Image (cartoon, rainbow, N blue to C red):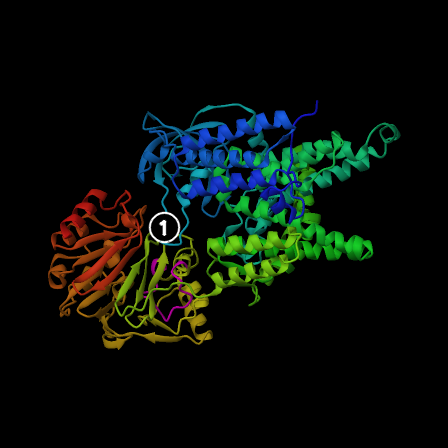
Amino acid sequence: MSLPVISIPLSGRNLLSKTLAAFKQPHPLSMPLAALILGIGVSGNYILPWFPLLLAGLAALLASILTACRSGYFPILLLSLSFLCLGAFWMGFQQTRPLPPNNISYFADNQYHRLEMEIIRAGEPNQYGWQVRAEALNVDGKPTQGGMQLSGGHDSVCPRPGQVINAWVRLRPLSNFANPGSPDWVKIRAGENIYALAHAGKKAALTLVGEKDGFNYKLEEIRLRWAASLESLPPGPVRGLIRALTLGQRSETGPELNNIFSELGIAHLLSISGLHLALVWGWGAMILRFLFSRSTWLLLHCNLPRLSLSLAFIPALAYALLSGASIPTLRSLIMAACIAASLWIKRPYLPGGGLCIAALLLLALWPDSLFTISFQLSFIAVGAIITAARPASDFFRYKLKLPPLVSLALSFIIFNMIITVFLWPVTVINFHQVPWLSILANLIFIPLTGALLLPAALLAGLTSLLWPILGAWLTGLVWYPAQLTVTIAQEMAKLPIAVSYIGGPGLPSVILFYLASLLLVTGAFRWRLWIAGLLLALSLSLWLLPSASPSHNERLEAWVLDVGQGSATLVKLPDGKLMMVDCGTTGSLDPGQRIAAPFLWSMGISRLDILVISHPENDHFSGMPFLLRWFNPKELWINGREQNNLNYAALLDMARQREVKVRVLSQGKTDLGGAEIMIMWPPQTYSSPRSNDLSLWLGIGCRNNWLWLSGDNGPAVEKNLRDFPSGKHLLLAPHHGGKDSCGKEFLERLRPQAVIFSAGCVNSHGMPRADSLARSAGAGAMIYTTANQGCLHAQAQDEGWQITPFLSSPRHCPFSLPSQLILRRQAEGL
C-alpha cells in the first residue's frame, strides 16, 4: 500500500479545482506554506488567543491525516487550514512567552558590575578593538542567563570560545530610537540572542575562571584559527571583505564599505548567503567528479553525478557551520539535501518543492525569521529564479535555439534583471534605496566574487588550517582580487546615478506588486496580463502618489526626534513650510539616513524647505549631509562662527555646489511662513572659547505660542537672555539638560509651560542632570524626555502647547527621569 501524498486535485466541479485550473500546476506544498506564512504574519502583528488556535490547528491536522488514510492523499484545504492555525499559534506563543526573571537584560543599567560569562563564539575585530558573543552566568554573584555582546579596546585581548571569564564591565541595555518609521532594534537583537551590551574597559581585569569543551567550541576554534590566518593582511575594508565572504564576520568591513555595497545592490555578497553555499557545493561537486572520473572502477560501478553531489554536501555543511549557519545558508543547505535525496531515491527534483520544504522547516523552528530581511531576500530571490528566471532561460535555450555561450550570457542577464526587480520592493521598504546600477553591479561582482575571490579565499583559508606557511602565501594572493573588488565598487558608487533614496512602499503596495508578479508568471488564463498590469499600476499609484504629509492646519507644530544623545527637531510653520533644526547624534551612526529620513518618509515628507544648524558639533549636525543631498532644501541657516571641523566644511561646500542658499543668522526678528522668527543668541560681537555658547538660540512664535530651540548654550548664555515675549512657552532644554542648565533665574523669566529634554536613553553623560530636572519641575513646567518617551509631537493650540509622546507608557532609562515622576507631572498638568 502506497503512502498518502499531498496532491491538488484539478478535476471536479468544486471552486478550488476551478480556481487552480486557471494557473499553472503549483507545487502541492505551496498552499500549506502560504497558509503558514499568513498565520505567522497575522499573529506577528496582532495579539491573538493562541490556545484556541492550537486546538483548531491540531483538529484540522488530525482530520487531514484521517482523510489521507482513507483516500490516499492529503486534502489541501484542511492541511492549509491546519498550517494557518498552527503558524498563528506558534508565533503568538513565541511572542507572549516572557523572558526569565534573571535574564541579563534586567541587570543592564549602564553601571559597572562584576560579570561572569561564557564565551560562545569566536571574536571579531572592529574599529574600536574587538567584540565577541557571550552567555551571561552571574552578575554580582546573582545567577543570570541570556546572550550578550562583549566588547573591548585594542589594549586588551579578546577571550577565546569556551572560556569562562570574570570581569568588571559596564552593562548597557539595548534601546530603540523611538520614532515613527524606526525599526525595533531591541526585538531584532533579541532574535539574535543578544539582550545586553557589555564593555570591558582598562579596569575590567578579565580573569579566566574555567574552560568548557564541546563540538561547538571546537568549531569556533577552527573559525578562530581561520580568522587568525587573515591577520597578516593590512587591516581595513579589503581584509574585512575577505573576512565577511569566508567567515560571515562583517564587523571589519566598516560603515563606508557596507553603505557602498548596499547602494550598488550587492549587499548580499557581504553576508554568507545561499549563493555562497551553492558555490561551495558546486565547486566541491565539480572537483569530486573530476577526481572520481580518474578511476575506471568508479566509472563502471557508480553513478558519478549522484556520488559527487552527495559527497559535496559534506564540505557545504562544514562551510555552513563555520560561517555561522545564517537563514539563507540553511535554506540553500536544505535545498541541496533535497537534490541529493532525489538522486538517491531516483525521483525528479522539483525546485519549488525544495524551496517549500526549506521554508516550512525554518519557519517551524524560528517563526519570527519571517520578518527578517535575510529570510525575505533569500526566499524571494530563489522564488523569482524558479517561477520567472528559469522559464526565461529555457526560452533562450530551447525555443530560440541560440548557441550555448550566447544562451548562457543572456540567461545570466535575465536572471539578474528578474531577481533585481522582484527584490526592489523589499529593498526599498527596508533600506529606502533604489540601486539603479544593481543589475550591472551584479553582472560584474557575482562572477568576480563567485568565480575568483570566494574560491581563492576558501582555498587559502582551508590551506592555512592544514599548512600555515602555504596558506599565508595564498592569503596574500587573495588580497589582490579583494582589492580589485573594493576599488571597482568604490568607483561605481561615486557615479551620480548609482542610487536614489526614497520612501518605501507601504504594505498594501508590496502585496499588490507580488500578487501581480505571481499572476504574471503562473497564470494560465487569457486576461492575466491585463489583470496583472492593473494590479501593478495600482501598486505603483499607492507607492508614488503623495502620501498624507502633515496637514496645513495653520498651526505651529514640532517633532522632537529621539536620536539618542543628540538633537533633531522638525518644525512645521503655519503655512506648511518645513524646517529641520539640527540633526546629529554621538557615535558612528548617520542620524540623517538612519533616523530622520525614515521618520520623514513615514510622515509622507520628501522635501524640506530649511535646514538649521545651531552649531557645528557632531551631535547636532552629523546627519545634515544626508538631508541636504536627498531632501533638497532651499536654505541652510548657520551661526557663521569658524569651526575647525572638516565634516562641517564639507557640508558647506556641498550646500554651495547644490546652490542651497547659506544664511548666517544674527540677533533680530523676521516673519516667515505665518510665524515670527526670533534669533536671541549669539550677538555678532560675542566671542567665547566654548563653542557651545555660540549656538543659535532660535525662537519660533505663532498666536501667543513660542517654541525655543536653544542648542548647546550653557548657563552663561542663559543669564544674558531677557525680554522674552509673553505667551505660552515650550523650551527644548539647553545642552540636553546638562550641568547647571535650566537655571532658576532663567526659568523664572521664561516661565515655560513645558520643557523637553533631548537625550539618549543610554548615555554616559548622565543627561538630563537631576538638578536641571528639579529646577524645571520646580518652575511648574511639564517635563518630557526623548529618553523616556521617544519622539515628542508638540502642537500649538489656543490654550497652549499640546504634547503627545510616541511611547504610550514611558520606558525606563538609566540616568534619566523616572517613569513615575513623568506620569505624576503629566497627571498634575491635566
Q: Residue at x 69, y 57 (%)?
A: 413
Query: Pointer 1: what residue?
Result: 177
Residue 11 rendering spot, x and y as whole percentages: 67, 40
Camera-side residue of 384 and 568: 384
To which quarter of the image does residue 339 belong?
top right
Q: On the rendered image, what quadrant is the N terminus found in?
A: top right
Span colored in magenta: 602-620
- In the rendered view, tell whether residue 257 sits above or below residue 654: above
Q: Residues within 10 Å of mark 1 (few under 14, many from 20)?
A: many
Percent position of residue 300, x then y = 88, 29
Q: Quadrant of residue 793?
A: bottom left
Tell me if 203 is positioned left or right of 783 in this view: right
Residue 615 drawn in magenta: yes
Look at the image and say whether residue 808 sits in the magenta stretch.
no
In this rendering, position of residue 571 left or right of residue 520:
left
How many numbered markers are drawn? 1
Q: Secondary structure at mark 1?
A: loop
Residue 590: horizontal and vertical position, in percent? Answer: 42, 56
The amino acid sitting under disc 1 is Phe
Work out whether residue 474 can be spotted.
no
Residue 160's spot in the image, x, y percent?
50, 32
